[in-house]
Amino acid sequence: MQPPGPSQMPTCSTFSQPTIVSYPDNPTVQVLFPPGWTATVSAITHKPYNQLVACEWKWGDEGGENVTRKKLLINNWASPCVPMHVVDGHNEGTFRVEIQRERESDANARGGLKLRAYHSIDQDVSGEASRNETHGSARLKVISTEKPSTAPGCIFRILVQDAPSLSNDVEDDISITVKCLRDGIFRANDQEYDLQNIQGDILPGLPKGVQCFYYFSINMYYFFHGHLDAFILPQITTARDLTNTNSVPDSFLGVNIAFSPRAMYQFAQLGDLQDDSYTSGQMADAKSLGDLGSIQNDTWIPHWDKDFTREPVDGVIIMTAFTEEKIDSFVRSMEMEFGGTMYRLHLVQGVTYGTIAQPQMQYPGSPIVPIGVLVMGYDGDQNVKTRPDWATDGAFLATRKLDVCIPEFNKWLLERGPEIFPEVPAQVAADHLGARLLGRWKDGTPTELSPDGPDPSISGDDSKVNNFNFDESVGQKRCPFAAHVRKANPRTDIHPVDSVYKNLMAMVSSIRQYSVTYGPEVTDEEHQKGRTLATRGQNFVSYSSSIANGFKHQQRSWFNEPMFPPDKDITPGMNPVLGQTGEEDQGVYRYMTGTNPSSEPQVMIFPDKFVNPQGGGYFFVPSMRTMWRFVTKI
């Protein structure tokens, strides 16, 4: 039986999804595509002799002429059960097929991919030399058609039988996978977006009681792809997964993944995201962020945990659950699955501490920003017109591991609080000073709304706890200009209604952020000594479409800048918690005004650092479509 001729083949007006055709009497398989679809092809050999998979396809150029293209997948002699590689593909195991670019002038245009297999038990006959009908494999059979839950499209799986057999069963001599994706499906216009394509911790955020950050380095990219495809991709939680449910079960496990520029380039030469900070990495930015460091072998190196400085971090896997056992079990299974293809560099695990003042739409009072400020490819993304297509629905992730000296901070508050509030007991004075430094009382009540003490009617009400602006007429009476909550989200301090420019600056500098607390509770011994004896802190996380305009801008131009917020009669000073001079070891300390509501110009100096950066990174969180199309190649 011969393959159907052009008149017999379905046109694109008769089907909207790719279809696959196989023939019992002909060792050929054809995949037919509607306009606007692409595919990736990969194969795994199961035999020790030479094998070859020939792939040919046609697609229409701008003039409407059919152009034939081909790729060959081959194995190596005596190397069974490994991915076949592309001839002239630099040992890549997968290639992309652009079957048909959609043309409005040709609604019925069709494209087809033809697959044929060959083999030779003669070691001297290999590669293209085996592409001869005398070496043709006996049979190709489609064994499954799948619709993945993690991305729109379909997957065809095909088995190749090299030698003839009287049995109806097909031997698994070669396994071929064809993954089909529709081009441009998410860009009907710049205002539409597909929640199925966005990893869920970007928006709306993974539910979390316990969270783990697994920083890793890839050891063998060639084999890493397959494990990523088989183990991680099916586990990834998308934004749609989270918005389509009213409740989260106790057994919930959330998984997301992000990569460094080095890893993205290794996967498929995906590198130019037009953000210099992402390209150079956070360690190169550390000095400008105010981190302490020193010259080592003629290179400035930050004083971070050595896990973050001795070798490159290729990515981070983010896991959330409601029990530590759930995450621990997943990590054990993951490390067994990946084996030596990747190895752990650093692991941060702890409980979630949500930063209330963040641009999440569920909090009344949070800044309303265009989605492109957080997610690439939409209005609000400053590079929306020049971003590569594969960046759409992705985001930058900035993480910071911050060791926090809680006993020292509490001791300092007990020493300095009574100096400012002498009329109340020492602990009450310490709590009051701490609230003015942070801009919130311990229960989350904003000092702007309740300057004299915590108010449960505010802290327990989502419609109030973040729904406020700073009253310029009272100066720093309620909340110092440099308080953490005011530095992190200055509200009308920088975007009053009469300033379009300042409003734009506030929008593009927005990030979605939260923190995860790691380490043990402070012990009685630490309280008594006022000294940290066990490592603890917060793993800071932020998502945005720009590192330079987002996290980096906030740290350098807001937290570290004494004149921010701008246009104040009294110099605000630096963020007392997260601000840095980068020269604390040389006696250049943080300072702020406003800690004393009775004497707003009074300057308070902070000779000790209570928060010390220990590492972190800049990563790209790819869309599900980009993961499926480029990153998970096997």
Image (spheres, helix red, strand yellow):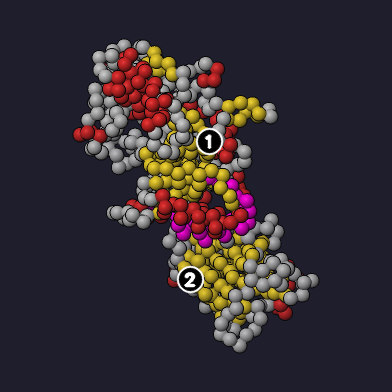
Q: Is residue 413 left or right of residue 610?
A: left
The x, y position of residue 190, in whole percent, is 42, 47
For the residue pair 48 and 340, the one nearer the viewer reads as: 340
Question: In which quadrant of the rendered image does the N terminus lie?
Answer: bottom right
As drawn, 550 above or below 185: above
Is 51 included in the stretch rendered in magenta? no
Please state the extent of the stretch shown in magenta in the rendering: 215-240
- Give the CA distance from mark 2 to mark 1: 44 Å
Residue named by callout 1: 615
Q: Residue at 65%, 78% (x, y): give it.
A: 162
Placement of the C terminus among the 4 image quadrants: bottom right
Give the residue at the far left of this rendering.
Answer: 457
Q: Position of residue 321 (x, y in %)?
A: 39, 51
Q: Helix, strand, or loop for circle 1?
A: strand
* Residue type, numbered disc 1: Gly
Tell which tag, 2 or 1, sits nearer the viewer.
Answer: 1
